């Protein structure tokens, strides 16, 4: 006599989903820093400053706001 085993009763197993490329915390911090940089650069451009100065002001404020936003926006275990 041969014994056959029945197939498992549950749905077929699926592979685990891949983790996201960026965490939600990182995405919120970077997008907020980008908005701050755009506003700062735009306001600098509206003052009549040269375009290079407006770009430099926007990039500087974006870069300087990232560490501040990391500490202000919770969500990461320290």
Image (tube, helix red, strand yellow):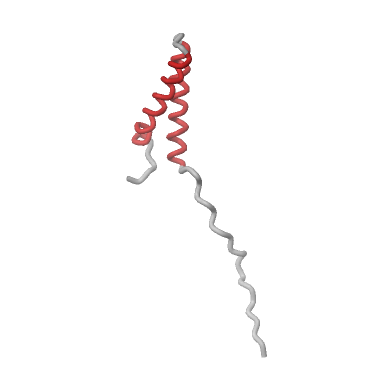
Residue found 46% across the figure and 12% down from its top: 50
Residue furthest front in the image: 52
Residue found 44% across the figure and 14% down from its top: 44
The quadrant the N terminus occupies is bottom right
Tally the numbered discs.
Answer: 0
Decide: is 49 above or below 78. Answer: above
Residue 12 spot, x, y in % from top left: 61, 64
Residue 30 spot, x, y in % from top left: 45, 34
Decide: is 12 above or below 37. Answer: below
The quadrant the C terminus occupies is top left
Residue 31 spot, x, y in % from top left: 47, 32
Answer left or right for 15 relative to 41: right
Decide: is 65 above or below 11. Answer: above
Residue furthest right in the image: 1
Q: Quadrant of residue 71?
A: top left
Q: Could you say which is closer to the camera, residue 45 or residue 12?
A: 45
Q: Could you say which is closer to the camera, residue 69 or residue 61?
A: 61
Q: Quadrant of residue 37?
A: top left
């Amino acid at each position: 006599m041969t014994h056959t085993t029945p197939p498992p009763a549950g749905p077929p197993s699926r592979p685990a989903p891949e983790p996201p490329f960026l965490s939600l915390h990182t995405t919120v911090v970077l997008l907020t820093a980008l908005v701050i940089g755009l506003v700062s650069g735009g306001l600098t451009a509206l003052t009549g400053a040269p375009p290079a100065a407006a770009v430099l002001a926007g990039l500087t404020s974006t870069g300087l706001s990232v560490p501040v936003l990391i500490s202000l926006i919770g969500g990461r275990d320290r």
